[in-house]
Image: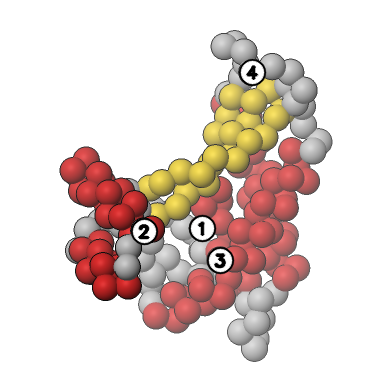
Amino acid sequence: MLTFASPTDEAQAAQLMQPCLIRVVDNIRKHTETLDWRTDYLEQVRWPGDATPEQRQRVRDLAARLAAASPEEEQALRQQLSQLPAPAPGYELRLTEGAGGADTPDSRRATLDVWELCFRVCFTDYRPQQPAAVDPTLLDADGEIDWLALDEKAKTLVEEAIDRAIAAA
C-alpha cells in the first residue's frame, strides 16, 4: 500500500500520477519500437499482503452482486466491501523476444511492473513500504508540472528498466 511522507506529497502525487503513467507508457512504446521484442500489457489485481483467500473471494462475490443491486442493496454491499481489504489495479508489461515471432517455450521473456515505474518517476528515491515523497524537480516554482523534467526522467528510467530486464532475461 502506497503511503506518503506528507499530505503535500499526497496532493502533489494526485496531480502527477496520471501524467507519469502517460509519459511512462509513451516512453515504453518509443523504446520498445527500437527492439525486436513483442510487448503485451496485462492488467493485474494486487491484494494487500494480509488479505486472506476467503476475504478475496468475499470481495469478488460482493462486487459481482453489486453490479445487479438495487439502490438499497448497493448501499449495504458497499458498506460490507468497505470492511474488507480492497484490491488495487496493477499493470504489467511483458516483453517476449522476437517481435514478429511465435511465443515458444525457449523464448526469452522479461516483465516490468508499470506502476512501479510510475512510482519511480513520480517520487524521490521510491522504495516500496516506505513513505513516498514527490520529486520536487517535477514541479516548477508555481507548483505546476514541469513537463520537460517529467518526460526526461520517465525516458531515462524506462530505458534503464527495459534494458536491465532484457539483459536479465
Q: List the residue tagged with mark 3.
A: 17
Estimate the spatial distance between the alpha carbons at disc 4 and disc 1, rounded to whole Å: 30 Å
Q: Amino acid at mark 1?
A: Phe
Q: Position of residue 28 (x, y in %)?
A: 69, 46
Q: Are marks 3 and 2 in contact (CB under 8 Å)?
A: no
| Left or right, 53 with reference to 10 | left
Residue 68 image label: 2
Residue at disc 3, secondary structure: helix
Residue at disc 1, secondary structure: helix
Estimate the spatial distance between the alpha carbons at disc 3 and disc 4, rounded to whole Å: 33 Å
Q: Residue at x 32, y 63 (%)?
A: 69
Q: Amino acid at mark 3?
A: Met
Tell me, yes or no, if residue 24 can be seen here.
yes
Estimate the spatial distance between the alpha carbons at disc 3 and disc 1, rounded to whole Å: 8 Å
Badge 2: few (under 14), some or many (20 or more) residues near its Cα, within 10 Å?
few
Estimate the spatial distance between the alpha carbons at disc 2 and disc 4, rounded to whole Å: 39 Å
Q: List the residue tagged with mark 1.
A: 119
Please tell me which residue lies in front, 91 or 157. Answer: 91
Foreground mark, 2 or 4, reads: 2
Q: Position of residue 44 (x, y in %)?
A: 46, 43
Estimate the spatial distance between the alpha carbons at disc 3 and disc 2, rounded to whole Å: 32 Å
Mark earlier in primary sequence (3, 4): 3
Residue 103 image label: 4
Mark earlier in primary sequence (3, 1): 3
Q: Amino acid at mark 4?
A: Asp
